[in-house]
Amino acid sequence: MSTPKGKLFVSDDMRKGLLMLTDDDNCGITSFLHSDSSNVRSQPQSFRVRPTNSSVLEGNDITLRCEVNNRVGNVQWAKDGFVNVVTPSGEIVGNPRWRMEGDAAYGIFNLHISNASLSDDGLFECQVGPNGKIKPIRSNAKLTVLCEYLKQVSFLWYSVDS
């Protein structure tokens, strides 16, 4: 088979995914890769780190962790069943105190909540969508926001004499 110098050549047999790289000096094949396209990304998505039930004192920050292996689907966070829209910069539309942080290349999609409020109390879910035959995965955790007022409450005991 003759291949032009310094060119990348992909065989006509795309079913087998034959890829040949040529050498500039002698047009010989210096390496080739063969991959069966049915095996590409065939490993299921899985959680390396799942979000865990957590509590935070009102006004403090908290990070709910979510790390994914073999991710092929889009990642999003939901609270109490409602999906949040995430911008490319990680901001959560409609909630400026929430932000998805991490590194997609390493499968890290943590949710950081700044200045937690009582309205943040609820069930959070890290969701990874499907892609082709790869199924979606989900993992949830309960976030409990503790009221700042409760730490200041003291009980007074007294008795009434009759």
Image: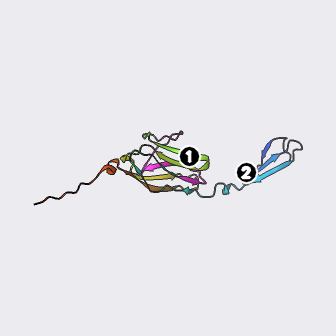
Instruction: Locate residue 82 relative to residue 66 in the image: left or right.
Output: left
Instruction: Locate residue 76 relative to residue 30 in the image: left or right.
Output: left
**Amino acid residing under circle 1:** Gly
Whether tag 2 and tag 1 are in contact, CB under 8 A, the answer is no
Q: Which of marks 2 and 1 is in front?
A: 1
Q: What element carries label 1?
A: strand
Q: Mark 1 points at which residue?
A: 102
- Image coordinates of residue 102 in percent, x first then y, are 56, 46
**The quarter of the displayed image where residue 4 is located:** top right
Instruction: Locate residue 159 relative to residue 84 in the image: left or right.
Output: left
- Residue 122, relative to residue 87: is it above or below? below
Question: Disc 2 to disc 1, how far (Cα)?
Answer: 36 Å
**The quarter of the displayed image where residue 15 is located:** bottom right
Q: Nearer the viewer, residue 96 or 129?
A: 96
Crowd band around label 1 with a 10 angstrom C-alpha radius: few (<14), some (14–19), many (20+): some
Q: Nearer the viewer, residue 22 or 124?
A: 124
Q: Mark 2 points at which residue?
A: 14
**The quarter of the displayed image where residue 6 is located:** top right
**Amino acid residing under circle 2:** Met
- Image coordinates of residue 155 in percent, x first then y, are 26, 54
- Image coordinates of residue 134 in percent, x first then y, are 58, 55
Q: What stretch is highlighted in magenta?
A: 66-92
Residue drawn at 83 percent across, 45 percent down: 22
Q: Let me know if residue 76 is in the magenta part.
A: yes
- Image coordinates of residue 97 in percent, x first then y, are 44, 41
- The first of marks 2 and 1 along the sequence is 2
Q: Nearer the viewer, residue 110 or 33?
A: 110
Q: What element carries label 2?
A: loop
Q: Let me know if residue 8 is in the magenta part.
A: no
Name the outermost residue toward the front: 161
Name the outermost residue toward the right: 26
Magenta stretch, overall SS: loop
